[in-house]
Amino acid sequence: MSDDSHSGAVPAQAAPRIIVHRVNTLQKLALVPKHFGVEVDIRTRDGVLVMDHEPWMQSAGGMADQGPEQKDSGSSRQGPERFASLVAALEGRFIVLNPKEDGLQDAILTVLRKHAVTDYFFLDLPFPTIWQLCLAGEHKIALRFSEHEPLEAVLAMKGRADWVWVDTFTRLPLDRRSHDALRSAGFKLCLVCPERWGRPEDIPIYRRQMLAEGLWVDAVMTALEHAQDWTAPLDVSGLRTGGKR
């Protein structure tokens, strides 16, 4: 990346793909631009793959009741929608698959293949499941890296998984050393927006820090309302950039 200290905006090629958090209904999918991606939460209900962040409870009358955590689950008030319905309506959007139950990966892959979806990765899988998928030749998986999840564990999986999920619990864990190590190992990077942890004010700070240090990510997972915070021109007046892309 060249020195942009006299420019008023981040170069267009530096903009990451936006992955919209918790797109668990067709209604929400319709709001997502087709050049963005979506993250979905997947469960089973009566043997069918559905989308919901939180489990649904069964009432005495046989109706599905929302638990106290359901307010921000991303599902509709009528109950969780079928995963296959959303996949059929993706229209080329990238999809991040977040199974909320272990053992769903084969059924999920069956749905993706039926609809010829190839732009995806799995997120938050238990390590034995990750290993099982890798042995089966599936590499579209994200490993986790954060202040609490060591870089060395990710690098040990070089050549087995394609993505790294860079979480931002209290800070940006990427620095030049970790960034270059991950890039040299061939990983793609998806950053968790700090607004997911209640710190939207950190977005411009992270963007400036990453630009100054020559760090870049392939994607950012954020809420739809914060997408523009990552795609809008960034004031970099007085900022010296010494890194290379």
Image (tube, rainbow, N blue to C red):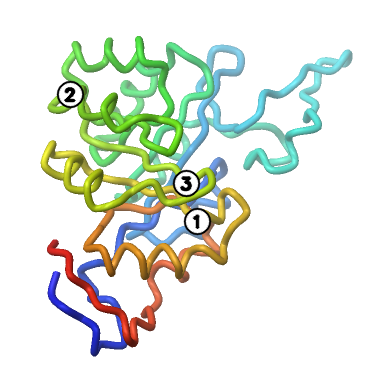
* Alpha-carbon span between mark 2 and mark 3: 24 Å
Residue 68 falls left or right of residue 128: right
Q: x and y percent of residue 69 in the render?
A: 75, 33
- Residue under numbered circle 1: 30
* Mark pair 1, 3: CA separation: 28 Å
Disc 2 crowd rating (10 Å Cα; few below 14, some 14-19, many 20+) is some
Q: Amino acid at mark 2?
A: Arg
Report helix, strand or loop for mark 3: loop
Q: Which residue is mark 2?
A: 160
Q: Is residue 171 left or right of residue 14?
A: right
Point 55% across, 32% down: residue: 51
- Mark 1 or 3: in front is 3
- Residue 74, quarter of the rendered image: top right
* Label 2 vs label 3, nearer the camera: 3
Check whether the beta carbons of the residues at disc 2 and disc 3 lie within 8 A of each other: no
The local secondary structure at tag 1 comes to loop
